[in-house]
Image: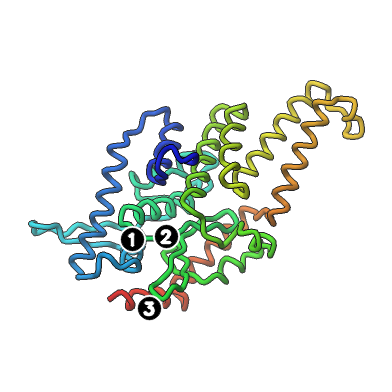
Amino acid sequence: MLSGKTPLSIKDAVFYAENAYYDNQKSYEAYNRKIQEMANLCRLKMKQLKLNPNDELVKNMMIFAFMTDTFEVKLPNKEQTLTHYPMRYDFDDPGAKKNFSKYFVTKLVDENTGQCHSLPLLYLILANELKTKANLSLSPKHTFIKIQDNRRYWHNLELTSGAILSNYHYLNSGFIKSEALRKGLYMDTLSTKEVVANVMVDLVRGYVKKYGYDEFVKQCLDAVLSHYPDCLHARMIYANFHTARFHYVAERNNFPPVQQLNLYPQASALYKLMLDSYATIDNLGYEEMPDGVYADWLNQVKKEKSKSENQQRMKLKQTIK
C-alpha cells in the first residue's frame, strides 16, 4: 500500500497487522462483516431520521453518535428495534502493556470496548465505508479525530469520552511544545498514507513483543520512514532498536566506558546511531508525558463532557437537522 502497488485501505491494513500478531488465525470475512453491519446501521438511521445521506457532517455525526451514544434503529420489515450501546473505554490495561491485543480494532468490534488507539481507527474505517472525510490527529500518548463542518470549521471528536473538544484541552496538557506544533507532530491531520504507515508501526510493535529486535524491524521502519519521515512512533522504536543493538555489542565487550568506545569501532558506531536517533526525536519537539499525567488529563476530559464544551456537540446536531 505504501509503495502504491495496492490501493490504500486503513481497514485492510489494520486487519493485516492484527492478524499477523494472531498468527493468521483471524477471519477477514467476520471482521469485514461486523464493520459493514455498523456502517449499514448508520445508513439506516440516517434514512429513518430523513437526513441527507450525502452530507459530510451528517455522516460524521452519525458515526460519532453510533460510537458514543445509545443508538436505536428500527429494523426494516420487522417490529423490532435494534439497540447498540456506546463503545466504552477499556480501563483494564489501556496502554496494552500486559495484553497487546487491547490496542486492536478487532478486539473493539468483538467486545465493544477500546481505547484511544483503536477507537479513532474504527472511526476512520467507518468514515471510509460511508465515504465521508475524517482525519486522525495526534497529541501526547493519544489519538483523536478531526472533522470539518459545512462552514469548514475544524472540530475535535474525542471518542474516549464522547465529547467534542477545543484545541485548548489538548494544548493544556503542558506536553505539547511549540516546536512539535510547528513541525506538525501534534494537532495536525494525518493523510491516509500516514495512517497506514502508523498501522505498520503497530505491526512492528507486535513483532517486537513476540520476537524482539532484528532485521525485519529495521526493514519495516525504513519503509515507514521513507513515506512518513516524521512518524514519531517509528522514530521511537528505531531509537529502541539502535539502543538494543548497542547494548548487545557493548555487553560482549564488557561494557567499556564511553570515553574508550573509540577502541571498539562497532560499539562506537552503534552508540552514535543511538544518540542520533534520540536527537531526531528531540528535534521533533517531543516531550515524554508520564502515565499518571495522561490519566489525570483523561479524567479531566471526561468531566468536560458534561460542561460547556459539550454544548458544541448540540450545536453540531442542530446544524444537521
Residue for badge 1: 63
Quadrant (top left/top right/bottom left/bottom right) for the N terminus: top left
- Asked if the residue at tag 1 contacts the one at tag 2, i.e. Cβ–Cβ closer than 8 Å, the answer is yes
- Residue 285, quarter of the rendered image: bottom right
Q: Is residue 33 left or right of residue 16?
A: left
C-alpha span from label 2 to label 1: 11 Å
Residue for badge 3: 315
Dot 2 falls on a residue whose secondary structure is loop
C-alpha span from label 2 to label 3: 19 Å
C-alpha span from label 3 to label 1: 17 Å
Q: Nearer the viewer, mark 2 or mark 1?
A: 2
Q: Residue at x 23, y 70 (%)?
A: 51
Pick whichever of labels 2 and 3 is earlier in the sequence. Answer: 2
Dot 1 falls on a residue whose secondary structure is helix
Percent x, y of residue 227: 56, 44
Category of crowding for the residue at label 1, using alpha-carbon neighbours closer than 10 angstroms: few (below 14), some (14–19), many (at least 20): many
Q: Nearer the viewer, mark 2 or mark 3?
A: 2
9 or 206, which is in the foreground?
A: 9
Q: Is residue 317 above or below residue 107?
A: below
Category of crowding for the residue at label 3, using alpha-carbon neighbours closer than 10 angstroms: few (below 14), some (14–19), many (at least 20): few
Residue for badge 2: 134
Q: Is residue 211 above or below residue 11?
A: above
Q: Does residue 144 appear in this view?
A: yes
205 or 128, which is in the foreground?
A: 128
Residue farthest to the top, as pictured? 252
> What is the three-letter code of the residue carrying label 3?
Lys
